[in-house]
Amino acid sequence: MSYRAPYKGLKVLDISQGFAGPYCAGLFAMYGAHVTKVEPPEGDWVRHIGTRFGDHTALSIVANRAKNSICLNLKKDQSRELVLEMARSADVMVESFRPGVAKRLGVGYEAVKAVNPKIIYVAISGFGQTGPYADRPGSDTVIQSFSGLCSVNRGSDGAPHRVGTLVPDTTTGVYAFQAAAAALAGRDDEEEGLLIDANLSQTLGAFMAPKIIEYHLEGGAPRLLNAPAGSYETADGYVGLALVKEQQFKSICECLDVPELVDDPRYANFETRAEHMDTLGPIIVAQFKKRPSADWVKMFREHDILADKIYDFGDWLEDEHVIETNMAPMVQFSGIGTLPFPTIPGMFPDSAGSSDMPPANLGQHGRDILAAMGKSDQDINALLDAGALTLPTEETTA
């Protein structure tokens, strides 16, 4: 064990699909654990969400790095037996079926616990393993809508919008990893393992906790915080503006060349400004359009005001701070190409930039995984003939 690979020697069995479950297991892999990914013959469906690069999409590259992949048809008895055999020596198991499906397939928590009493079993779903919505599918858009996240992300049209990245899936993957890591830390003093119900709806509740508490304590939709903080169009783009102290409003007015607003009683403090954004907002919008973003940001920083140009991803990748601190080292993967791979806080940057941890191709390690389990070529051929195992095409025809 080391800081670089603290989970070296840990075994994780990942039978999940999508992003949340695979990302949870993928974090263990990035920290040195040996992760075996079990996929159906057609592969994890996330391999087909977005543009394909070789055997991957951007989502599967991030979620499935440094894993070993085997394709098993869990509808076959032989495949279920193999999963349970692998689970027998695993420390953590991750699945993302709808509640009840893993049990019907014979690989649910009770079945796994029977062969491995101390397993940390992570079950990821949309709405949890119990409750009236347990059987509902929980996609990214559904959970963003259900959680209230869309309601606090209103566009210039005034309508609520989903955030354009997988917030529920990514945060669920991180929270599930955190819960499993905590369980591993306490497992030595426990007699049996643990079922972790990690669901997207609960995750977004935890993620949105301050806004939910604020809503309750203020008796409804809370006032706009720190008005006139927000995003404003400039002569050539957009700037994000923030303020946390009352005196910063005076500085903003000076920069925007509207000093008369400072003494207007409607804009005296955060609360009154929030109540009168219908009149204050248009004034600020009009002023921002008079200069390019760089001018505003430079001026605001000189006056100790929190502001920055709103970047796209290309801007971010080309930013001198991102480059100097190696936030997204370039890494080359065979069959995919060279790409920037953003680092995880606390992880060694050269780990993210290493081509030694490629995302697993579909079924790439099937034969090796089975051989390590003591399966002979005859056993493997029998699994292939039964339709329980699928190997990569070039290997199958070799």
Image (cartoon, rainbow, N blue to C red):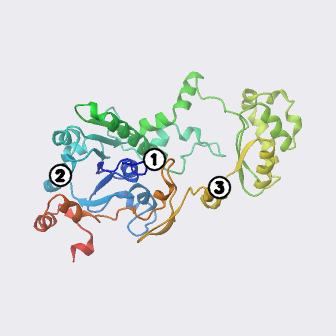
Q: Amino acid at mark 1?
A: Thr
Q: Quadrant of residue 258?
A: top right
| In this picture, residue 30 sits left or right of residue 297 | left
Residue closer to the observer: 36 or 130 = 36
| In this picture, residue 396 sits left or right of residue 216 | left
Cβ atoms at labels 3 and 1 below 8 Å apart: no
How would you rate the neighbour count of disc 3 (Cα within 10 Å): few for under 14, some for 14-19, many for 20 or more? few
Q: Is residue 371 above or below residue 16?
A: below
Q: Secondary structure at mark 3?
A: helix
Q: What percent of the width, then of the height, locates residue 17?
A: 34, 52
Q: Which residue is found at the position 52% from the left and 36% from the top?
A: 148
Q: What percent of the width, then of the height, locates residue 340?
A: 53, 62
* Residue 80's disc number: 2
Residue closer to the observer: 47 or 374 = 374
Q: Amino acid at mark 2?
A: Arg
Q: What percent of the width, then of the height, locates residue 105?
A: 20, 47
| In this picture, residue 253 sits left or right of residue 76 | right
Cβ atoms at labels 2 and 3 below 8 Å apart: no
CA–CA distance in space, label 1 to label 2: 28 Å
* Residue 321's disc number: 3
Note whether residue 250 is visible.
Answer: yes
Q: Secondary structure at mark 2?
A: helix
Which callout, 2 or 3, points at the residue further toward the start of the chain? 2
Note whether residue 99 is visible.
Answer: no
Q: Amino acid at mark 3?
A: His
Q: Which residue is found at the position 45% from the left and 47% from the top?
A: 170
The residue to which callout 1 is attached is 170
Q: Secondary structure at mark 1?
A: helix
